[in-house]
Image: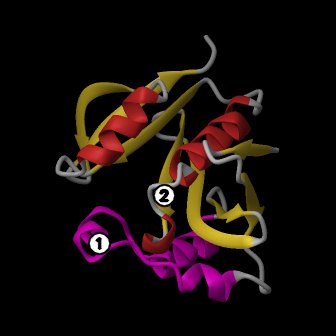
Amino acid sequence: MAAKTPDTTIITLREITRANYSACLGLRVAPEQEPFVATNAVSLAEAKYEPEMVPLGIYAGERMVGFAMYGYNEADGAHWIHRLMVDVAYQHHGYGRAALRLVLARLRALPECARIAISWNPDNAVAERLYLSEGFTKTGEVLWQELVGRMRVRA
């Protein structure tokens, strides 16, 4: 599955493997964004020990430009998008939106996926605008000191 950005760059999601994990670890957000997202090293460690997590590289053509991770939360019955980041050098090109749409399409394709959830730091207005514009609804919940958005996929 692929998505196009406004400038027609093809965006894909690819498994994190031995061949590309170093590129993933090298991705960085802008310094002012660091409080909003865990490092990719932390995320990859979580994925190693939490098998329900699915870590993915976000690719623009053949270049890894970001990272996403999702997983199922048995406690609330929702599939959570735990991470979505684009390297500072590749921001403002539509890669984040395209990647979010690809993750949502993957989750919607899962027969058992009835609800999708995401959370964001209350100070991250850019993330909030993106998530709400793609169909998430603020719930009023606060988890991990973050605001929660949810969407229903099927009844």
Residue 70 versus residue 130 in the image, above or below: below
Label 1 belongs to which residue?
34
Query: Which circle marks residue 83 in the picture?
Result: 2
Question: Which of the pair 30/42 is nearer the observer?
Answer: 30
Helix, strand or loop under label 1 = helix
Provide the residue span drawn in magenta: 21-50
The quarter of the picture where the C terminus appears is top right
> How many badges with numbers are in the image?
2
Residue lying furthest front? 7
Which of the 4 image quadrants contains residue 34? bottom left
Residue lying furthest top? 155
Q: Main secondary structure of the magenta part?
A: helix
Tag 2: residue type? Arg
The quarter of the picture where the N terminus appears is top right
Q: Residue at x 77, y 27 (%)?
A: 111
Tag 1: residue type? Glu
Q: Residue at x 69, y 29 (%)?
A: 108
Q: Earlier in the sequence, mark 2 or mark 1?
A: 1
Q: Is residue 80 left or right of residue 120?
A: right
Q: Is residue 9 left or right of residue 65?
A: right
Which of the 4 image quadrants contains residue 136? top left
